[in-house]
Amino acid sequence: MDVKEARQLVQLRYGEIPAEAQRVVAADRRRRDIRANTRERIELIIRGLECGDWRLLGYDSPAAWYAELTDFMLAPAPVRRRLAEVLRAEGYSLRGIATLFQHTHRVHLIDLPGFGEAPLPPADWDTVHYTDLVQQYLLDRIHGSVILVGHSFGGKISIRLAARHLAPVRAMVLIGVPGLPQPAVSRVGFRRSGIRWLRRVLRALQPVIGSRGVEWHTKRFGSRDYLAAGELRPIFVRIVNEDLTESAQLIACPTLLLWGTDDTETPPWLGERYKEIIGPRATLDWLPHKDHFPFNGTGAHLCAQRMREWMKDLADV
């Protein structure tokens, strides 16, 4: 049986090539799997789909073919040290930092599904699905130790990855990461409660005033992450209140917390709380007068400097 006949067999059994099979084939191509599009591989896809066991297809997680990320690597020369950047959005966001490390580290800039050039993920995704996908990427594409660098949403993925104690993850840098519950009583908590109450009122008034009230509220009080989420907003809304306390407690690798003192989207108390949860393995480094995007402009040099100082104490990274 040749490849064409195998494809015809798939179509005869299923009426058409199932979306799942197409995703497996696409995942093979992303992994640069030499088996892709061979007769044996297509027959294996048929068997895996028939019995419903995706492990037969050679993947540790079904997330590996249900969505895809895109990546760009700097410094392809054979350097020993690696810096894997897992970002809240497109890899370009931290490119300023990446270029400052490209002569000493092999840097992987990653677009998570739905960000940058990567296609949207399924609508029911959460950070666990994203973590499964990035884990597959690390295991397939990276050989040796890495430092994860995660900002905001990407920081959530980094925390979940570090909590799994994967062998490649040597250390981690977190920049302005949400994911912890508000203190029971706080000024910020009261403000957010008021904002939510106002939104509920504006929604109730939509039959009278139309959608302009809700639109005004979104533009006035929505975070920059939320406003930039676009088609990802349903996923963003679902995961915005995720509590990563248990995952943070499991972190065993050295962790650098870079936090802007003027960050209003992930306020400084979050950095202090992560430091408290992670314990002596965490180093909290304040970036004076920096907001939620401390790496913008000349801030990239400041972030890179703090990272290099911290990395001096890390062996073999």
Image: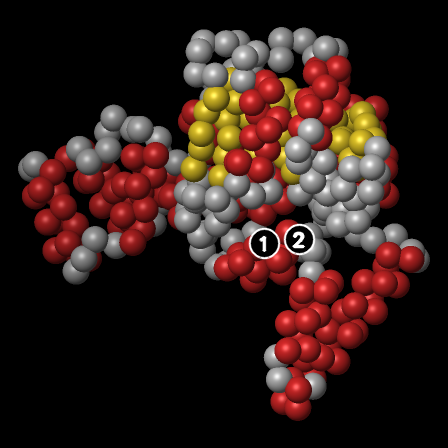
Q: Would residue 87 appear left or right of 276 to someone viewing this image? A: left
Q: Would residue 179 appear left or right of 210 to someone viewing this image? A: right
Indicate the amino acid at tag 2.
Arg
Percent of width and height locating residue 187: 91, 57
Q: Which residue is mark 1?
A: 228
Percent of width and height locating residue 179: 72, 47
Figure quadrant of residue 154: top right
Percent of width and height locating residue 209: 66, 87
Q: Which residue is mark 2?
A: 224
Figure quadrant of residue 81: top right
Percent of width and height locating residue 11: 15, 54
Q: How is the image coloured?
A: secondary structure
Categorize mark 2 by other alpha carbons within 10 Å: few (<14), some (14-19), many (20+): few
Q: Residue at x 48, y 44 (%)?
A: 116
Residues at badges 1 and 2 in contact (C-beta under 8 Å)? Answer: yes
Relative vertical location of residue 131 with respect to residue 304 in this rendering, above or below:
below
Indicate the amino acid at tag 1.
Ala
The reply to whether residue 287 is visible in this rendering is yes
Relative vertical location of residue 205 with respect to residue 85 in this rendering, above or below:
below
Q: Residue at x 59, y 33 (%)?
A: 94
Mark 1 vs mark 2, CA separation in Å:
6 Å
Locate the C terminus by quadrant.
top right
Figure quadrant of residue 48: top left
Q: Would residue 210 appear left or right of 53 to someone viewing this image? A: right
The reply to whether residue 165 is visible in this rendering is no
Q: Secondary structure at mark 2?
A: helix
Categorize mark 1 by other alpha carbons within 10 Å: few (<14), some (14-19), many (20+): few
Locate the N terminus by quadrant.
top left
Q: Residue at x 83, y 24 (%)?
A: 280
Q: Secondary structure at mark 1?
A: helix
